[in-house]
Each structure stands twice: as structure tokens, then as C-alpha cells.
Image: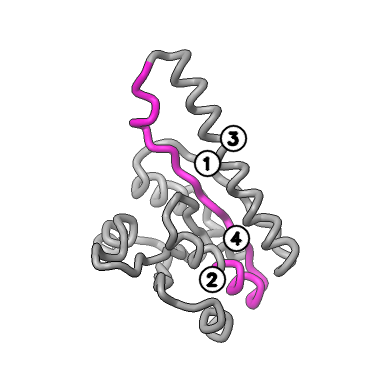
């Protein structure tokens, strides 16, 4: 089954990316894999403190994921998969694509303010020619209704 890989982070634009991935997966019989990345700089403390912070970060991610997973199950009959990796975001996204051959499309949300599309979109589009999957960039200003008509 082809999977749509989407990144779960604290950005507003990730909401549209998750919604779009769920709609496309539902329409095409695919799956959704949600990747959340814990940056390594969060753990530059003593070993015991780092372990506690790592566990707290994982619990926060799992709680956040469960909100989206319930919505996907209830509205689209999709059981999303959660993957948590630690490292630099772009490296971990590329690593996940390489590690899972079922990933068919990377879905990213673009910011809709004057600061640009966001760091992930900016960095990944620069290396998009070397990716083994296409990237779908979902505009941050895309309305739910318009998105549903496109997907």
C-alpha cells in the first residue's frame, strides 16, 4: 500500500498537510504515516535529565498524534502510523523515506505568511531532485472546502 508521509510538528501548516494526506489516502486506498522528529538539541543535558525529557517529548507527540489518528479513523476509516525519530528534521525525513519503501509521496504544509513557506519546505525543495518520492506542498491558506474538492 502506498503511504503518504506527513510531518507532525508544532507549526500551523502541518494541519493542512495532515488533512490533505488523509483525504488523498482515503480517495486512493493509501495509508498515512505521520513522522514526528525530536531535535537533538532538546537533550543537551545530563543523562538522567535527557532521558526524562526524551520520554516527555514522546508522550507529548503520542497525545498530539492521537487527536489526528482519531479524526482519521472516524472520518476517513484510515489507521495512521506514527513514527518518532530523533535528529535533524531534514535528515530524518530523508532517512524515513529511505527506510520505508512503501512511502510514495511526501506531503508538506507551506506557511502562509510573509516569512516564507517554512524551513522544511525551503530545505526539502532544494534537494527535491535527489528524492525518491514526489513532494506535495499544501498551501497554508487553502480552505478546507477547496482542499476537499481537490483531493
Q: Disc 3 designates what residue?
A: 59
Q: Nearer the viewer, mark 4 or mark 2?
A: 2
Residue 31 is situated, as x and y percent measured from the top left of the image, at 63, 63
Residue in front for this viewpoint, 114 or 17: 114
Question: Mark 2 falls on what kind of element?
Answer: helix
Question: Mark 4 falls on what kind of element?
Answer: strand
Please tell me which of labels 1 and 2 falls first in the chain.
Answer: 2
Q: Disc 1 designates what residue?
A: 84
- Say whether marks 2 and 3 touch (CB < 8 Å): no
Question: Mark 1 falls on what kind of element?
Answer: strand
Q: Is residue 42 magenta?
A: yes
Q: Disc 2 designates what residue?
A: 20
Residue 80 is situated, as x and y percent measured from the top left of the image, at 65, 56
Q: Give the distance between the C-alpha atoms of the residues marked 1 and 3, in whole angstroms.
A: 11 Å
Q: Is residue 121 left or right of residue 34?
A: left
Q: Is residue 107 magenta?
A: no
Amino acid at each position: 500500500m502506498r503511504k503518504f508521509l506527513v510531518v507532525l510538528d508544532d507549526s500551523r501548516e502541518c494541519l493542512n498537510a495532515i488533512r490533505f494526506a488523509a483525504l488523498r489516502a482515503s480517495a486512493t486506498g493509501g495509508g498515512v504515516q505521520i513522522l514526528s522528529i525530536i531535535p537533538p538539541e532538546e537533550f543537551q543535558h545530563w543523562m538522567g535529565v535527557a532521558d526524562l525529557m526524551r520520554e516527555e517529548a514522546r508522550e507529548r507527540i503520542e497525545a498530539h498524534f492521537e487527536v489526528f489518528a482519531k479524526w482519521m479513523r472516524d472520518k476517513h476509516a484510515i489507521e495512521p502510523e506514527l513514527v518518532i525519530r530523533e535528529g535533524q528534521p531534514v535528515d530524518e525525513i530523508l532517512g524515513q523515506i529511505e527506510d520505508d519503501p512503501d512511502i510514495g509521496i511526501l506531503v508538506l504544509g507551506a506557511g502562509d505568511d510573509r516569512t516564507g513557506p517554512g524551513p522544511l519546505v525551503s530545505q526539502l525543495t532544494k534537494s527535491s531532485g535527489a528524492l525518491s518520492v514526489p513532494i506535495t506542498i499544501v498551501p497554508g491558506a487553502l480552505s478546507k472546502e477547496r482542499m476537499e474538492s481537490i483531493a
